Amino acid sequence: MKHITVVGASLAGLGAVRSLRAEGYDGGITVVGEELHRPYDRPPLSKAYLKGDVTAEALALGDAEEYEELGIHWELGERAVHLDCSTTAVILANGRRIDTDGVVVATGSTARRLPGTDGLAGVHTLRTLDDARSLRTELVSGVPRMVAIGAGFIGAEVAATAHHLGLDVTVVEALDTPLERQLGAEMGRICASLHTDHGVRLLCGTGVAELESGGGRVTGVRLTDGRLLPADIVLVGVGARPVDGWLADSGVWVDNGVVCDAGGASSVPNVVAVGDVARRPHPFTGRHARIEHWSNAAESAATAARTLLTGDSATPRATPPSFWSDQYDVRIQLAGCVNPGAELELVEGSYESRSFAALYKEDGAPTAVLAMNRSKIFNRLRRTLIPAAERIAPAAV
């Protein structure tokens, strides 16, 4: 290969570039990014950046010296609209064509929005640096009330940050227990108590019927049970969808993301996918799914780079997927795979103090570890987790 195009100036996209060079590739590399920004770290957007504790410059994942050494040609502020697999060319929205020998799809995902809210002032999602800048401007403008729709990690983190900045905050969650799908009911209830104990209202088991507005700005959130929550700012945190529409009619198999094998190879030769746009069988969980974790972006990039350069699907390591979330005065860390019905075993600390480490187990085998404010033992316990292949193999013999 003489030229590789990475579509997506993201953590995963930059990881792919670094991995390609580490594997010895010395050809040309073009990185296409829809945003004007070079790759930056996204987790602080909902926490430290919104609080004003860090600047946008501090979020940068690389610097000019490294980028010069990597030999990247940047195409920023440009959106890919089509992939011509017959000639392996990336087509941009401005009509330009980038002829290339290999493609890394690293377009990630975009925040889901509520229908009919585009252009309504005061309604925000949080996925990009520009999203965070816009939200922060309003959070520090002196408005008193915010409603967060969705008690997932984005909604919970922004709610905690808004509370820290002095706003009156309400969180609305359609499920009876927040984060039950990710952590189970018991741990979900513990996470829910973080809000209530800090004076943030949490309304569960009810959905949003519509947003009310006046003069082009949101004024309230009408719930499905009829209640009206006055709101000056609304944060919509109802999940994300993969940015894969530009691959329609390309020949690349897309189904809730780019369908890949474990090594990141798509259905088309010389096209791989990385990060949370890639739907692949994960060697630890055994699931064929998209994983929207920071750690997955870096790990999948290294594997896909080897796959692209060798033409053979590389074998990824069975590393437990992991993530963290900072809410109020608590750091939540999870690694592994939480399946319905898993048993919880408290290893250290206490649930009541919200300072503990606990294992999820299936048939006695540890499959995941959850910790609150116990980073040291969390890092030790994550090394004891058993991948799905090792748990399944004895029963199959």
Image (cartoon, rainbow, N blue to C red):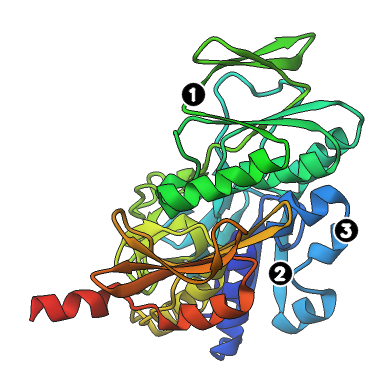
Left or right: 54 as drawn, with respect to 254: right
Instruction: Decide: is 276 above or below 112.
Output: below
Give the x, y percent position of residue 319: 43, 78
Residue ID for mark 2: 73
Cβ–Cβ under 8 Å for marks 3 and 1: no
Outermost residue toward the left in this view: 397
Foreground: disc 2 or disc 3: 3
Which of the two labelled residues, at mark 2 and mark 3, occupies the earlier sequence position?
A: 3
Q: Residues within 10 Å of mark 2 (few under 14, many from 20)?
A: some
Amino acid marked by disc 2: His
Residue lying at 57% horizontally and 43% vertically, measured from the top left: 192
Mark number for residue 55? Answer: 3
Residue ID for mark 1: 206
Q: CA distance from mark 1 to mark 2?
A: 48 Å
Foreground: disc 1 or disc 2: 1
Instruction: Decide: is 107 above or below 26.
Output: above
Give the x, y percent position of residue 61: 74, 70
Amino acid marked by disc 3: Thr
Which of the two labelled residues, at mark 3 and mark 1, occupies the earlier sequence position?
A: 3
Q: State whether residue 104 appears in this view.
A: yes
The secondary element bearing badge 2 is classed as strand
Residue lying at 52% horizontally and 83% vertically, measured from the top left: 380
